Structures are given as structure tokens and as C-alpha cells.
Image (cartoon, grey):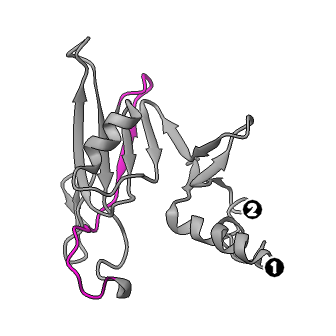
Amino acid sequence: KAKKVYLGGNHEEWANRLIDEQPNLAELIEPEVVMNLATRGWKWIPYVGVDKNDNVVRGSYTIGKLTLVHGEYTNKYHAGKTSDVFSKSVAYGHTHDIQLYTKVHVEDPSDYHTAQSIGCLCNRSPEFGKGRANRWVHSFGVLYTRPNGHYNLYVPIIINGKFTFAGKTF
């Protein structure tokens, strides 16, 4: 009964840019086509799209009071920047590291929103990095939402192929 949603990111967008340069590749390299997402029951949300008014928009998906996006910023304080720009609670993975920022509203100090980067499940030392150090962390997000839209987002960190969640080590 799970909803399966694939949020495209900058890596998937590279395929679209290549198709713009080489239109003969259309329907051959798009991630949503190659992975057969629609037939497999996945909702595809592109990283960059166009709304009904022909405005360029970034893909997002909201569950309760949390909006999921691929992510936009890569600076040292990307969670703070994301919180300031979105002005609502957001989770993202673009930076491949873990960071959390909480923004409290002056008008109502009991009201706040967060931006959280949830890490990655990828090669932490990719060939293109040429051995440079990075802040990438193996982790993933586990989201629980309540009927009122409030949520808990847990980010288990994977160390040496293992993580602990709900008191159990996997």
C-alpha cells in the first residue's frame, strides 16, 4: 500500500540536457523511461519542470507538514539556506551529507520549521572526486507522519555496512 515516488535530481537532469543537445537520444536515456517507473507504479517528479502557466518549477512532494525535494544548495550551511528560502519544513539529499537547521518564527516563537539533509546511499569516493575529502555520509531517512500532518524524520547513519534503528542493529 506504499506510495512510491521518485524525485528526480540534478543527475537525472543531465539526461535531459544531453537530449537537448542530441534529440535522437529521446526515449532512450531518460531515467523515468529506462527504469520503467510508470509501469512499475512509481510517480515520477522531475527535478525541473514546467507548471500550467509555463513557469519553470522545481520538483517537490509533500507528506503531511514535510516537503521532500532533491535539494538546491551545496554551501557549508545549506540546511540554513534551504530553511530560509523554502520557509517550511523540508528534507533533501542533494549534498550527500547530514545537516539540520531549525528556523523559529519571530511572530510566534512556538512555530518553527526545519530543513534536513539526509545523506546518501552512494559511492563516497567517486572517481570524479580524485580522492578529495568530502562530507558525504551513508544514511537514509525514515519518515513517520501522523493524521494531523506532524511527523518524525529519523536518519540512521550506516557505519561499516550496519545501522541501528528502533533499538535493533541491521
Q: Tell me the mark number nearer the camera, choosing from 2 and 1.
A: 1
- Image side of residue 13 versus residue 153, left or right: right
In which quadrant of the rendered view does residue 19 lie?
bottom right
The residue depicted at 71 percent of the width and 75 percent of the height is 21
Residues rendered magenta in the picture? 129-150
Q: Where is residue 151 in the image (x, y as percent from the top left)?
A: 35, 34
Viewer-nearest residue: 35 or 76: 76
Q: Distance between the residues labelled 2 and 1?
A: 23 Å
At numbered mark 2, what does the secondary structure look like: helix, strand or loop?
Answer: loop
Q: Position of residue 135 (x, y in %)?
A: 22, 67
Q: Position of residue 52 (x, y in %)?
A: 74, 36
Residue 153 can be seen, yes or no: no
- Image side of residue 19 versus residue 68, left or right: right
The amino acid marked with disc number 1 is: Asn
- Image side of residue 12 versus residue 110, left or right: right
Viewer-nearest residue: 90 or 80: 80
The amino acid marked with disc number 2 is: Thr
Q: In the rendered structure, does residue 149 fall within the stretch colored magenta?
A: yes
Q: Position of residue 67 (x, y in %)?
A: 45, 38
Viewer-nearest residue: 158 or 133: 133
Q: In the rendered structure, does residue 167 fall within the stretch colored magenta?
A: no
The residue depicted at 31 percent of the width and 52 percent of the height is 117
> For mark 1, what is the residue?
24
- Image side of residue 137 versus residue 94, left or right: left
The dot on residue 104 is none
> For mark 2, what is the residue?
39
In which quadrant of the rendered view does residue 169 lie?
bottom left
At numbered mark 1, what does the secondary structure look like: helix, strand or loop?
Answer: helix
Mark 2 and mark 1 lie on one chain; the one further toward the N terminus is 1
Q: Up-down: is 36 above or below 45?
A: below
Q: How crowded is mark 2: few (under 14 residues within 10 Å), some or many (20 or more)?
A: few
